[in-house]
Image (spheres, rainbow, N blue to C red):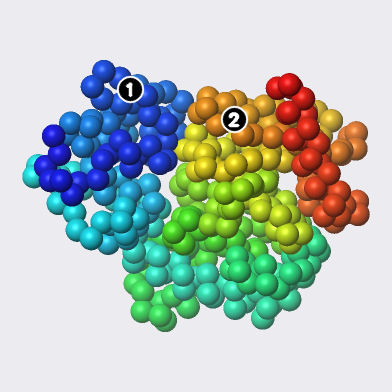
Amino acid sequence: MKAYESDPDIVEVISRYITLRRLGSSYSGQCPFHATSTYDAFRVSPRLNIFKCFNCNETGGPVEFIRKIEGVDFKRALEILDLKEYHPMKKKRIHTETPGTGIRDQNILARAVDYWTFNLYKNPAGISYLYSRGIRSYSLIKSLNIGYAPAKGLCQHLLTAGYSKQQILDTGLVKDGENGIYDYFRNRVTFPVYDRNDIIRTVTSRTIDPEQKIKHLHLAGEIHTLYNERGIDNSYVVLCEGIFDCLSLLQEGYNASALFGTGGLKPYTAERLRKTSKIFLAFDRDSNEAGTKGMQRAFGIFDSLNIHQVYPMELPFIVGKKMDINDLFLSFGFTRDDFRSLMEDAIERKNSIHC
């Protein structure tokens, strides 16, 4: 039994994030802390009020689970659980680090984001690139803290702010090379990725240099959240492949979020949309059916989790040319009403199948 009456129920807490299946006196599920498609390694014990994954070895009680999956400190975890105090079970505790970034790292990342947002309007290259992609809403750019990373300057900026070289290196914002440390993001538009608790989980970027081979670059580590996740409305969301598709829709007044490519949808990110009434899948389309395959894969993940309020959209495309949402609005004169029609078509198709 639980050690104290104030202990939150571990099954109820974890069920907010993933689907659990009863397995005798315990429960099993897909571990949210690493990529997996099986249910056999992640176990939850109601009697002991703990969870444990036998693959990645993550373990702990309700508060530890919240700290890990939300990337927050102990105090914030209690707030999420709505607990004034918490008495963990009297047993040997296994210390687990917060994924992505800790509290100190958050301070460094926040300073970096401020530095980049300041440079966006200071340096015309960054804002010009956004304008060239049709993203011109100042309020949207500001609300998402979109910025610009110049060729150099961030490392010195953080050192001047009082952080040590090692602290900055640990965030991944700078790298140590043969000629000394250098900024990881250079000549790039930057996009901080927040979770629903305003924690910066990672930073991704897009080069503005057409000669640069690596177009998209983000901090090392698996991304456990969606772009604009903190802005998702429970009434509906349009789920896109890329950030610029998402930005185009947000600029038109739609609720939108983005993966980081069709492979970006994992069971644990799909779970974050469980409470959303309608999930529209708006992936790129091209003549070789790559987008269609990505759509089918995403639909299969949602279906395996018993999330059925999913509506695949059929975007128009030109044979021989890859088309995405940003292209439709930027180059083909798509309007807000045109996209609304595509959403209505997706609902009608699904309803006709279930008639």
Work out whether 290 lies above or below 97.
Answer: above
292 sits to left or right of 194:
right
Q: What label does residue 334 carry, if any?
A: none
Q: Secondary structure at mark 2?
A: loop
Q: Is residue 297 above or below residue 200?
A: above
Count residues near mark 2 (Cα–Cα under 10 Å), then give few for <14, some for 14-19, many for 20+: some
Residue farthest to the left, as pictured: 90
Q: CA distance from mark 1 to mark 2?
A: 21 Å
Which residue does the image show at 61% across and 69% down from the upper left? 143
- Is the residue marked by circle 1 packed among few (<14), some (14-19), or many (20+) residues within 10 Å? few
Tag 1's secondary structure?
Answer: strand
Amino acid type for the residue under numbered disc 1: Arg
Image quadrant in which the N terminus is located: top left
Residue 22's disc is 1
N-term-proximal mark, 1 vs 2:
1
Residue located 55% across and 53% down the image: 229
Indicate the quadrant where residue 190 lies: bottom right
Residue 239, percent across and down?
A: 65, 44
Q: Which residue is mark 2?
A: 308
Residue at figure coordinates x 47%, y 45% from the top left: 224
In percent of width and height, residue 119 lies at 62, 77
Q: Position of residue 95 (x, y in %)?
A: 21, 48
Amino acid type shown at disc 2: His
The spot of residue 79 in percent (x, y) is 32, 59
